[in-house]
Image (cartoon, coloured by chain):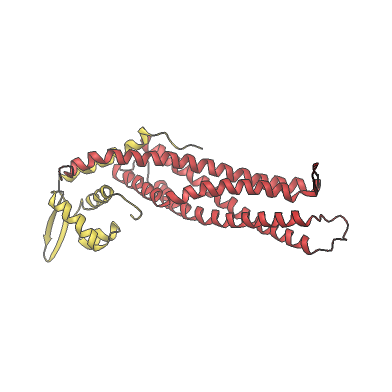
Chain colours: A red, B yellow
Amino acid sequence: MTPVLSQFRTEIRQFFLVSLLNLVFAAIAIAIGVQYMVTAILSQTIDPFIPGFPMIPGLRIFTGAIAMICFGLGIRWILSTVRIFEGIVTIKDDLEKASDTITDERLTCLIVRMLAHYRDNRKTIRTMILVCTLGGGCFFVLGIANSLKVLSISSGGFAFTLDNLLLIPAMLLTLGIALASLLSSYYFSKFAKVWDRRLHEIDASECALKKTLGLDEQ
Amino acid sequence: MSGRRTVYEIYWEILVYCKSPRSFTGIINRCDLNSKTGQEYLEFLVAKGYLSLVTEGEKTRYHATPAAAEYIGLFSSLYQKLFDATPEFKL
């Protein structure tokens, strides 16, 4: 196996993994967004005299709003990932089908396809970096807001009480998603940096191709 | 192949595909081109001597000339060099 093939194959496999994880976490993000929205709505309508039920109307509205943003970001996240994922899957499958003795032309063809796919999705990847970072932040806030039992703000400061039973599972899940989305953002930006540099290299090497085709004389 | 490609990538794709004689329809289908731009690309490559026209009965086919090998080789080496020149993407 040539070093180029080995490197290209590894990169595609790893980016495939990042995209797959993104799909899974985007789906979980949507589900949790819906769950928090429903919880926020139900706690607004429930009888306030039921003992033990967390009842902070302002906070619930805030949680509901953040959950709605998370839900929207989750949908945007999943739609963007699907577009990137589909292209990567077809390239990865073709690369897996090709044996280690792949011809130069076939390998170049797959590289060109990957470049075309990257050019097509460059904007989407940039959006993904932003959406994942925003999503991470929102889920972090959501995790904290949803585990608050009492919150009082006065001119002298603020005091809050956390519900331990709600805190642990909710915090773990939302922190997990926040971490996953921040990691996704990091890997997407890393991937974009590498492929942007390759596009730049191609622009620079186009002079040689132009010369071969005799276009520089025109 | 579809997606956003540079003109040099399209030339390379046409030349590689035409290593054996190909019809106009075959080329535009394979390279995902419309007939107008496909015609322009083919005319350019024929004018530069990278493609020759082969007539088989009533059919005219395009065939890559030995001169095309230089372009194909240079293109492949430039694109594969991308993986030497730039740092790789790693998890």
Question: Residue A115: where, in percent of width, then height?
Answer: 37, 46
Quadrant where the N terminus of chain A lies?
top left
Q: Residue lying furthest front in this view?
A: A155
Question: Residue A82: where, in percent of width, then height?
Answer: 50, 55
Q: Is residue A114 left or right of residue B34?
A: right
Residue A88 seen by the camera: no
Residues B23 and A193: in front is A193
Q: Is residue A131 left or right of residue B42?
A: right
Q: Is residue A178 left or right of residue B50?
A: right
Question: Residue A95: where, in percent of width, then height?
Answer: 40, 46
Image point 84% across, 63% down: which residue? A47
How many marks on residues?
Answer: 0
Residue B89 seen by the camera: yes
Residues B2 and A50: in front is A50
Question: Residue B66: where, in percent of width, then height?
Answer: 15, 45
Image point 14% across, 62% down: which residue? B60
Image point 74% across, 47% down: which residue? A169
Residues A2 and A55: in front is A55
User: As displayed, is residue A159 above or below residue A38?
Assistant: above
